[in-house]
Image (cartoon, rainbow, N blue to C red):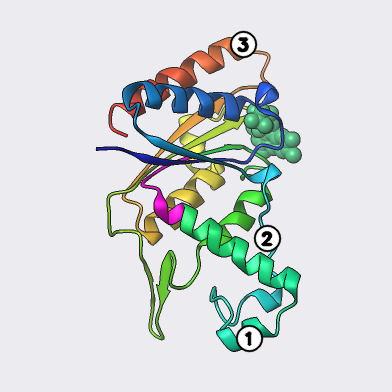
Amino acid sequence: MSYHVLYISSSSKPEEFSTSKQVGRYMIQQLLQKHPDAIVEELDLYTSNIPMFNYKLFSSRATLPTPEEYEKLSDEEKQQIKRINELCDQFLRADRYIITAPMWSLFFPAILKQYLDCIIIQGKLIDISQKNVKGLLDDVERKMVYIQSSGGTYPLVLSWKLNQGAKYLEEIFGFVGISSFKKVLVEGVDSIDITKEQVMQYAKEDVDHLLKRF
Ligand SMILES: Cc1cc2nc3c(=O)[nH]c(=O)nc-3n(C[C@H](O)[C@H](O)[C@H](O)COP(=O)(O)O)c2cc1C
């Protein structure tokens, strides 16, 4: 079976300075060794066009404009709709997802949330009926790994409370229908108690372990 991987990164740093991106790159390299025929698409959120959802870009809750509303948009707004559709289609093409992020103020960077608002759209990832909202991604088996690097380390008892970003992503992607969500926590990157090499070594071991079932 050939995998279609979407690799989404959200650190503002170039890869040579970013721990989360370096662990993400390691995962892609290992995955390609195991599955040389895998298709990998990459989306660096900081260097890509991720539209800000201004009020004209949706007609109602997470729903893109109707054809009549679309015709009234400016050329720039039409381009943004086109881009949102491209981002949704790119997400739907994949069946394996690797998301990397630094922990920022106990969450992930805002650009990742902006991206989620662009893709969790009526008729694409969700179906909104009058009574409820249903995820649409349970048509095929999809799996996600979230790699988060943080300056500090968080003991297990506090981890569930303080890792807000990981918790939120697990919930929202579970809701849209992604059946498996695993995380790699690259902790202590800015700590004096552990070297960066050791932090990377632990993270790579976690990645190797997860790849057995990815
Ligand atoms: C704006 C900002 C907020 C941060 N907030 C946290 C935080 O809440 N907890 C933490 O442990 N580290 C925090 N850090 C440190 C980063 O998570 C850490 O340096 C991480 O390894 C960066 O990943 P990157 O190299 O992939 O960008 C923060 C860093 C920045 C720039």
Label 3 environment density (alpha carbons within 10 Å; few <14, some 14–19, many ≥20): few
Q: Which residues are magenta?
A: 91-98
Closest to the observer, 110 or 214? 214
Query: Which picture quadrant has residue 212?
Result: top left
Distance between the alpha carbons at the discs numbered 3 and 1: 55 Å
**Label 1 CB, ligand 1: below 8 Å?**
no
Q: Quadrant of residue 56?
A: bottom right
Image spot of residue 168 (x, y percent): 50, 52
Q: Does label 3 or label 1 sit earlier along the sequence?
A: 1
Q: Quadrant of ligand 1?
A: top right
Circle 1 sits on which residue?
A: 69
Q: Label 1 sits on what residue type?
A: Glu
Which residue lies at the image location 63% right of the left edge and 22% below the top edge?
Answer: 189
**How far across and down, in percent of the image, does residue 6 sit?**
46, 43
Q: Tell me the amino acid under the disc marked 3.
A: Thr
Residue 30 x %, y %: 41, 22
Residue 43, image quadrant: top right
Quadrant placement of the N terminus = top left
Mark 2 closeness class: few <14, some 14–19, many ≥20 residues within 10 Å: some
Q: Is residue 17 left or right of residue 186?
A: right
Q: Residue at x 63, y 42 (%)?
A: 106
Residue found 70% across the figure and 85% down from its top:
72
Q: CA distance from mark 1 to mark 2?
A: 18 Å
Compute the Cα span from label 3 to label 2: 38 Å
Dot in front, 3 or 1: 1
In the image, residue 158 lies at what x, y percent?
51, 37
Element at badge 2?
loop
Q: Is residue 167 left or right of residue 180?
A: right
Task: Compare marks 1 and 2 and give the one earlier in the sequence.
Answer: 2
The residue where tag 2 is placed is: 51
Asked which secondary structure carries label 1, the reply is helix
In this rendering, would 59 be left or right of 157? Answer: right
